[in-house]
Image (cartoon, rainbow, N blue to C red):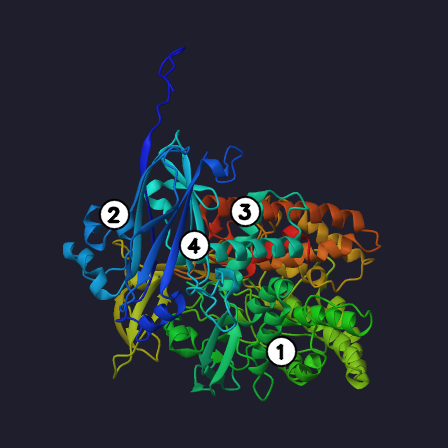
Amino acid sequence: GGGGAGNTKKIKRRRITAYVYFGIDCDKSDNSDANNYCLSQAGEDANLNIELVGGKTASSSSSSSSSSSIVSVMATTNSLGTMTGTLRATSYSPGASPPLLSIRRLSLNSMADVPDAASRAFRRDDDDSANSNNNFEEEGHNVGVVQIEAELPFTVSWMLRPAAAAGDGVAADEEEEGEDPFFTSIENNTSYDNDKEEATTGGGKSSSSSKAVRSPVDLLIDQELRKRMQIFEERFEATFHLRDKGYNNDHVRFAQAAMSNLLGGISYFYGASSVQIADDDEDTKRQQTFSSFNLPLFSAVPSRSFFPRGFLWDEGFHQQLVHKWDVNISLDVLAHWIGAVREGGWIPREQILGDSANRRVPHRFIPQLADVANPPTFLFLIEKLLVMDDQRKYQQQQPSVVLPADYLVRVYPRIRRWCEWLLESQEGPVPGSYRWRGRKQTSPDGGPLHPNTLASGLDDYPRATNPDETEYHVDALCWSITVVRIMAALAAHLGNDEDHALYSNKDGILTQALEDLHWNPRTKSYCDVGKHSAGGTFETRYMYRCAEASSSSTTDVAVARDVLEARGNPCPKSHPKPLYPLGDGQGGLLSKEYFVPGKVVKHQFVAQYGYISLFPLLLKILPPTSRRLKHIMNLMENDREIRTKYGLLSLSKTSRFYERGNAPGDKPYWRGAIWMPINYLAVSALHYYANVEGPYREQAHRLYRELRENLVSNVYKEYKRTGYLWEQYDSKSGQGKRSHPFTGWTALVVNIMAESY
């Protein structure tokens, strides 16, 4: 081409030198039997057939047999497995188009003249010295290099194949049974263009000509990877139908990455859990800790880099996606988790098994409290398995993977034991009520701003201000209703009439208790109940270190500024020796906020909005005709409360605890941020209510479309911006927060895109 307007320049024919190199690794130092292997599998001869074709591609219409030059390279293996021999032209026409200027076999001692890219074809010792290239023959490397000079444009096509034994007439693709299938024909083609100093190899991707040449093993791997990728993409589309829903390639790649990383995090663990049993008094600090028996666990993880261990309620969400891809994986995972049921029915909330998992967890979080539960999200998978088993038994359909006929029968006893433990251990103070265990009153001397409820999965979500045994939680009751409903369905499916009647009766009792105990007519919402102060103030306290009188044991307490300034002794009786106030690392004192309840503390509704308010809808407990559905959906549409263009907030903007940290260094967790698992339950429930007859069907449909679009667009936007799926998303900006990559339950965005719940 030319430089200025109207300035043209004739393109001259250009010459280029191409190197075709090949190798069979017969390094006896790495493989004791490699020499005999190569000689027996390659035969005495290995043929490299090279074809030069005019035009930019080997399939170009301008190509013909008359414009080709075919050259064979005969490489004979010697006793060390090293290739020797000379070029032998079986068909060569110097005047053919394109002109073949020269072709020659390079000797092993001339490798210093070959470009670096060709040199990399040869396996070197760890010592990358200048002399290392001269030792190939002595080291037993079975290699060869062919140098071709020709005029552009042309295509080099080559094939390396084992030669037939003399006179037997057996072609490479007619190998006898029992021969190694690895060493068959290996093919590739490389095009050299007049317009670019680039070579296009195989699948058409460009690289510099020095990088275009590939070893036979590289090509086999590339070929297999391409085939597997195509199979994966076809199966992914057949499973989730994202292109049918109008998603473009970028969205599909994003969804494939999300699901693939969840699958890639499925791990095998083995070891013992550290178990802690508390005294009858929940507030006591005297607890017995011991190691349980060793057991295996096959499970996905929330984040391979941050949380490489099993989480009970996370895993139920993980399997909502995994079972759609391969139900056999889900069956194995469920069997391992149910296999972890202790004699009484308890399953540890976190499975921290083995030294590797233990090293990634702060010591204080390793012991698992034997009375602390977790939401039974695995029962969602049981629901899906019931549908699959019905297809097998009644509809005579053959799903992609047939559920083993006795699988549910075999896991039922352990599932029942776990569910009975949940229903008994988390019972509340009045009939029909349920309370998550593990909440403790915050000491005035320190502790978090508000007591955590780790058992619920919503850790620092604010509950009653003065926790005690008289409180009860709306989400705990909703999960219990889910337990009895799914267990009733499972028992009926298995023909266990006695259990079916038992759980069906409990369903009616607990559903009525939800209305009687938790519906707040003033706020028109479902609320927790407990000793609670509707008022209160936030005060700043300063951290002070104290020690025991006769030992070096220390504790940190929170004290008011006036106490600190009075220079008195702020230490408790257990640690009466004052040491010093703690610094914040920036020249000041380490402080924390402390909530002081108002003077009026009484047993009442905890009247605030957030994820807790949604649970009767999230778990589809309310019938489609319930007037209370409308109140919950009105809350979900309220911009002043929990609605955003990124998803539903975990806590209302009107709450006094909204976006407040719980302790120094402990940033707000479930106090405003947008979380995928609850939003997923919301989308799934809205989809359900939008597709059944009821007076609020249209509102559910409108909310469903909006929430689905908001979630997908924000998670995708953050993935494109950062390259990660995140643990949670900011309540104000929608930006990803905290742990990343987090391809645990955040990968449920794939189900939302597919509208497969």
Q: Which residue is mark 4?
A: 219
> Upstream in the sequence, badge 2 or badge 3?
2
Q: Residue at x 41, y 64 (%)?
A: 166
| Dot in front, 1 or 4 | 4
Label 1 to label 4, Cα distance in Å?
60 Å
| Residue with the most extreme top position | 6
| Residue contact between numbered discs 3 and 4, judged by CB atoms under 8 Å | no
Closer to the chain start, of discs 1 and 4, is 4
Q: Report, in whole angstroms, how far the alpha carbon at label 3 lies from the one at label 4.
A: 34 Å
Q: Which mark is residue 116?
A: 2
| Residue 327 drawn at (x, y percent) | 64, 69
Asked whether disc 1 touches disc 3, contact meaning CB atoms under 8 Å apart, the reply is no
Q: CA distance from mark 2 to mark 3?
A: 42 Å
Q: Pick the quarter of the image with the N terminus.
A: top left
Q: Quadrant of the C terminus?
A: bottom right
Q: Which mark is residue 426?
A: 1
* Number of other residues with Cα within 10 Å of mark 2, as a class: few under 14, some 14 to 19, many 20 or more: few
Residue in the foreground of this view, choosing between 396 and 576? 396
Residue 60 percent location from the top left of the image: 51, 36
Mark 3: amino acid: Tyr
Local SS, label 4: helix
Q: Which residue is mark 3?
A: 716
Q: Amino acid at mark 4?
A: Leu
Question: Residue type at mark 1?
Answer: Gln
